[in-house]
Amino acid sequence: MDAVVSNSRDMIRKGSRSFALASRLFAPATRDHAWMLYAWCRHCDDEIDGQELGSSPVARPQQDPAHGPAHDPAVSLVKLRTETRRALRGEAVTDPVFQALQRVAQEHTIRERHALELLAGFEMDVNHFSYRTLDETLLYCYRVAGVVGVMMALVMGVRDTRDLQRAADLGIAFQLTNIARDVVDDAGHGRCYLPAEWLAEAGIPTGGIAQVEQRLAVAGVVRRLLAESDRYYQSAATGLQALGFRSAWAVATALGVYRDIGSLVLARGARAWDTRAVVGTPRKMLYLAVGGLRAMRSVTWDRWRDAAPRAEDLWTMPEFRGAMSPGRPVDRAYPETLPP
């Protein structure tokens, strides 16, 4: 294992136990590329939030000689875009995470705008975007997670438009679950991804999400959000039949574990944010076994059946709207420019 892959492996082990477990089910070559893609995504997220592997406190906002220069997300975003473009254009890069991205992109023909879409999502955080509607929340979810699902699907050899959309659905479902789990913590950092329309309907005042007296109302809004996430999990599960057995097993395991996080939040109701919702090792092992069974079915029985049609009211990637005909290849479905 070379230094770039080794660094990527260490980052996923420390940054996400759930994804690290699932990634071990991939065939070795797919696993290594999944680790490398994760390393770049994790690095970008950390650079924007001033964190290290998603767990350190947010960096100090003011200049402090004892702690070095102040963390400026806008400056970090510019640097990330510059280094990402250099990596994807085949220029020399020295940072292992950008070397990792470069190798994955060259091997699997991942286009520049996939990566830039992720950074566009982080830009929404940098600019303190206000989410008024569910569609705006879903746009954010696609940019910071759905497009990662698309890139991962490309790593796994998927090229059909419909299957890439299912991969995006899984990323969206993951991010909706993250929002539900972290809603109070996010509010403490001045971020809210819940649709303002839903909060208004629930009678939750602006800036009131973190207030203890609002927990029951917040739980009601989060229940709606998790109901939406379930629809995307269901859609994503249909895409398993496009994968080989080991890839399907890894994806099915991650799907089960993450969906269970949402179930824990839902079951706790207003007490969901007293402690962080975490899926313990015994339940992860259960989803590992269940994922294997789902993967076996997806590559046998499900291959002989037509996939259930995707619900028309699910959020669809802008570049796929009107381009979802059966069998249409990705190179025709994807335009060369980002949607506005």
Image (spheres, rainbow, N blue to C red):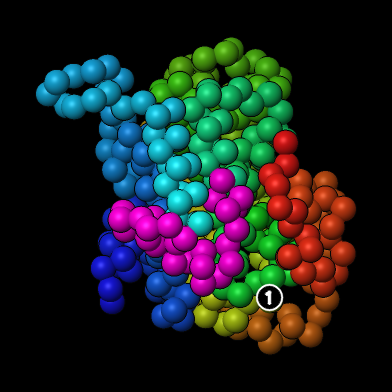
Residue 55 appearing in the image: no
Chief secondary structure of the magenta portion: helix
Residue 229 appearing in the image: yes
- Residue denoted by label 1: 242
Q: Residue at x 68, y 76 (%)?
A: 241
Tell whether 163 sits left or right of 250. Answer: right
Tell me the kind of residue under disc 1.
Ala
- Look at the image and tell me in which quarter the N terminus lies: bottom left
Q: Where in the figure is residue 282, as x and y percent of width and height?
A: 37, 66
Q: Residue at x 77, y 69 (%)?
A: 329
How crowded pointer 1 is (Cα within 10 Å; few <14, some 14-19, many 20+) is rated as many
Tell whether 180 sits left or right of 71. Answer: right
Q: Where in the figure is residue 336, as x and y percent of width and height?
A: 71, 52
Tell whether 329 sits left or right of 116. Answer: right
Q: Where in the figure is residue 207, as x and y percent of width and height?
A: 52, 14
Tell me if residue 40 is in the magenta stretch.
Answer: no
At mark 1, the secondary structure is helix
Which residue is at the far top?
A: 205
Which residue is at the far front?
A: 91
Q: Residue at x 27, y 17 (%)?
A: 62
Q: Where in the figure is residue 303, as x and y percent of width and height?
A: 74, 83
Q: Residue at x 45, y 35 (%)?
A: 77
Find the magenta span and give its range: 90-116
Work out whether residue 103 or residue 132 is closer to the camera in this orientation and state it.
103
Work out whether residue 292 or residue 10 is closer to the camera in this orientation and state it.
10
